[in-house]
Every structure is written in C-alpha cells, then in structure tokens.
Image: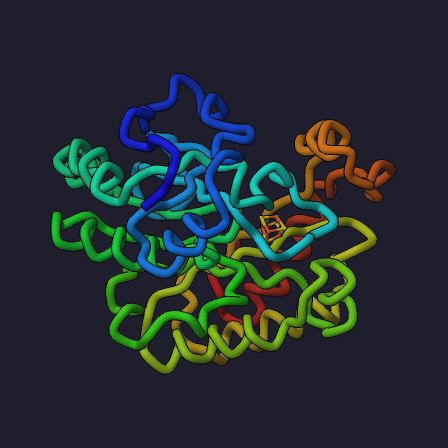
Amino acid sequence: MIDHKPSVLPLEAETPYVLRSDLSVTVSERSIKQALETGDIGFLHSFTTGSTVDGPGIRVVAWTAGCHWRCLYCHNPDTWTLTNGMPVPLARAIMELGKYRHGLKIMSGGFTLSGGEPLVQDRFAVRLFAAARSMGIHTALDTNGGLGGRLSDEELEQIDLVLLDIKAWDPERHQNLTGQSIAPTLDFARRLAARHRPVWLRFVLVPGLTDNPQEIAGIAKFAAALGNVERVCVLPFHQLGRFKWKKLGLNYTLHDVEPPSSELIERTCSVFRAEGLDAA
Ligand code: SF4
C-alpha cells in the first residue's frame, strides 16, 4: 500500500488551489506504480464544486495530477507531475462524491474528471466513474484523448460525456504544440463515434498558432463526420497560467501572444458552424 497517510488528508478544498504542490513527494515509486495499476489511490491536484463549464449543469470537478503532454499554452503545468497531487483513496473520493449526489441531480449536473490528463490514472478514473454512475451521477471525462486506448469498450459506457480536446489538425503542428502525435486522439474520437458516445469537442484558439482557417476547417470536417459531436467549445487563449511556468522554472514561449479578438473567436466558431456543428 501507499506509504503516505492519505486517509487523514481532507478532500474538501477551501479554494481550488489549496491542495496543490508536492503533496505526494514522499510516496515511493513502488506505491505510485501500485496505485496506477489498481486505481486504489488517485492523485488529485484539486477539487472544485459549482463549475458550469465542464459539462452540462452544475458540476463537481476533480482535477487529476499527471500529464504526459507538454502543450505550449498549458495553463496548469503544475498538474504535469503526478507527485504534485494529493493521494486520495478511491473509497474516500467516492464517499465525498456521494455527498453531492442529490444536489447534482436537482441541478441536472454531474461529476467531471479533468486534469492534467485523467487517463494517466485510467484505473482510478474508471473505478470512480463506475461508482458515480451507480449513484446515478452523470459522468464526464475531460481528456486530450492520447491514452483513450487504455479504456475498454465496456469502460467507455461508464462515461456519459467526453470533453475531447483537439489541439491542432496538421500533424507536425500538433507535435510541436503538444510534444505528442495527434493520431491516438483521432483514433479515440473515431472509436467514441463508433460507439455513439456523446462528445463535446474543445479547441483552444491561439492567435498565430492555432488560428489557421484551413486547419480549423480540417478539424470541423472531421468532427462533423463523426456524428456524435454535440457541441464545439472554442476556448480563447489567455495568459493566466504564465506565472506558473515561471514559478516552476519552465521555458514559456508565448509571452507575446495576445488573447484572440472577439472577431477571431466568432470567425472560428463560424467555421465549425459551417459544417453543421453547434459552436460557441
Ligand atoms: S494536455 Fe492539458 S494538462 Fe496536458 S499539457 Fe496539454 S493543456 Fe496541459
């Protein structure tokens, strides 16, 4: 088992950020490996209630630690490392979630697992989703899709909605932007479509980096052809995470990039709408 004492750590956060920073540094590699294999323990970066942007209705959101991508615009680089999360026993996470079950139903909301990349901890994610579902709670997974192959078809059925990031269309641009290939994400998107799993597509609009109209049209055509994309969320780039890069001693390269204008956001949405998608 884990050498830390996770059971004494509270899951409730006074602010979304109070749980951050090196909470798991004393957890041994062996224990982390065991936790990843079984899902008995999850590493959570923070926990919020009342979100209205991470799925339908009012959401409880657990932010997992750990991400294998390195997006140039990431505003949560403090979630990259698994050991920046707080070790939370699965049973404890389920118990906490259970406290919200009635309220979430009344508010037509649910539970969203975000990150970081939640599928770095795929066993924990799957077991937490199954528990949420058994309590009648709507479940959503916010993912870059790169590790979607870790989920079986049966496990996909435990997820009511996938918030899927497609970050670029050109494979080389995607590689430069994220450090990873786009292929697994597109494979996951096709698989979700084949199984008729609802998807909200998320696209971060960065002037000079992801605003090429032909590339956006490529994503739009792909998404429209899938047939299961209920909504496209165009997320404007912002600089709110810049201080974290500095604090972590990371090389941030987007200092001079401005957030997109409202005209550019509208133009981008209209490219998606031209393919018959609901975009905002
Ligand atoms: S996938 Fe998300 S958490 Fe991971 S580096 Fe990219 S923006 Fe950050």
Q: Write the residue at 44% across / 47% down.
A: 114
Viewer-closest of 116 and 59:
116
**Is residue 129 placed above or below 158 in the rendered structure?**
above
Front-most of residues 53 and 176: 176
- Looking at the image, can residue 221 be seen? yes
Q: Quadrant of residue 91?
A: top left
Name the residue at 49% across, 70% down.
Answer: 276
Tally of numbered tags: 0
Name the spot of residue 71 as percent of width and height, x first: 69, 52
Q: Is residue 250 left or right of residue 272?
A: right
Viewer-side residue, 103 vs 266: 103
* Colour scheme employed for the rendering of this structure: rainbow
> Is residue 53 among what the camera can see?
no
Q: Position of residue 216 (x, y in %)?
A: 68, 66
Which residue is painted at 38% across and 31% down in the image?
48
In the image, 257 versus 143, the foreground residue is 143
Residue 39 rendering spot, x and y as whole percentages: 32, 54
Name, please, the residue furthest toward the top: 14
Q: Residue at x 49, y 30 (%)?
A: 23
Q: Is residue 175 left or right of residue 106?
A: right
Above/below status of 1 relative to 8: below
In the displayed orientation, state which residue is furthest to the right: 256
Question: Which x, y percent locates residue 187?
Answer: 51, 79
From the viewer's perspective, tell me whether residue 190 is left or right of residue 250.
left
